[in-house]
Image (tube, rainbow, N blue to C red):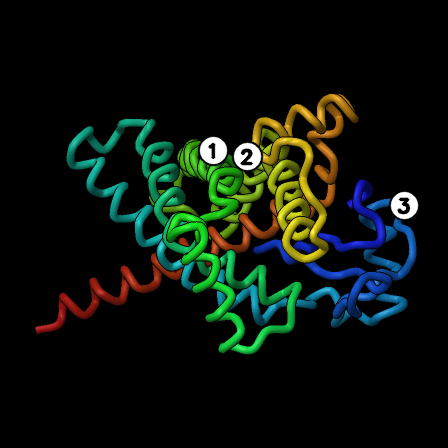
Amino acid sequence: NPFHKGKCFVYSNGLMDHICVCENGDSKAWYKKPGHFKGTLDAFVKIIRIEGIKSLWSGLPPTLVMAVPTTVIYFTCYDQLSEALKNRLGKDDEYIPLLAGSLSRFGSTTVVSPLELIRTRMQYRKLSYKQLYLCVSTKVAADGWFSLWTGWSPTVLRDVPFSALYWYNYERFKKMMCKEVGANEPTFFISFTSGAASGSIAAVITQPFDVVKTHRQIQLWESETLKIPQRDGTSTWAVMRKILARNGITGLYTGITPRLVKIAPACAIMISTYEYGKSVFSHLNEKMNQRP
């Protein structure tokens, strides 16, 4: 983060963001930044050369702990909501993916938000479970239960529109490609291509909210860990106005290239694997039901 050099940085591995303390901060970071990067490709080359290819998967275990239940809730809700909306609005209603995607992401984000806050605290402070319990209980006692949903609004503003745009475009691209090749159900390639395209479109449109979310994470870290008072407003719109005043509209699209590089394949792999798995289990159920 260029505005907070020497304090902390936000690391993202494709599924979730991680706040990390810099090497020259109060403690050592688990990730050692190998100098300055000229671009995404340059970053890949330098990280692999200096730290080895395994470092590209740094922080994967804590990510999976959060990502697995979040994804299970998200996809289950989407499928159930889609079926419920089809029964009410009709199977051919093109806005069903948009509604189901929005509601399912809103629900999963709201449910997991307190866990996300706890995970973030554990990342920039080495706390035992007892210390973590005391930290959380003290915050609840001081600020109430709603304090556990700190950072919820910028996350929702980023993830809900992303989800709505993603599912809406994915279903359209999938139908279009199936019609083009004459397939009754999507192949792995169709799902993969549709997922990558729809994920890229959603990422570009929602990038400003991703930038704001990162800035708010940094502000929270500074105020609670470095005890730096926040003079400016910390609301989503206040942070957005601050970025616009300082860097213009381009400031809201900082990091769009690496985000596209991570989002496109992540969405493609996730949805194609999900569709393939759903198809396999669907055929297995049909075979089992046909047995005498």
Secondary structure under the numbered disc 1 in the rendered image: helix
Q: Earlier in the sequence, mark 3 or mark 1?
A: 3
Quarter of the C terminus within the rendering: bottom left
Instruction: Choose between 69 and 112: the one closer to the eye.
Output: 112
Q: Earlier in the sequence, mark 1 or mark 2?
A: 1
Instruction: Choose between 148 and 273: the one closer to the eye.
Output: 148
Mark 2: give few (<14), some (14-19) or many (20+) Cα within 10 Å: many
Expressed as whole percent of the image width and height from the top left, the position of residue 116 reads 50, 57
Q: Which residue is mark 1?
A: 161
Secondary structure under the numbered disc 3 in the rendered image: loop
Expressed as whole percent of the image width and height from the top left, the position of residue 41 reads 83, 50
> Residue at left 41%, top 46%?
186
Q: Which residue is mark 2?
A: 202
Type of the residue with mark 1: Pro
Q: Can residue 177 be spotted in the picture? A: no
Q: Are marks 1 and 2 in contact (CB under 8 Å)?
A: yes
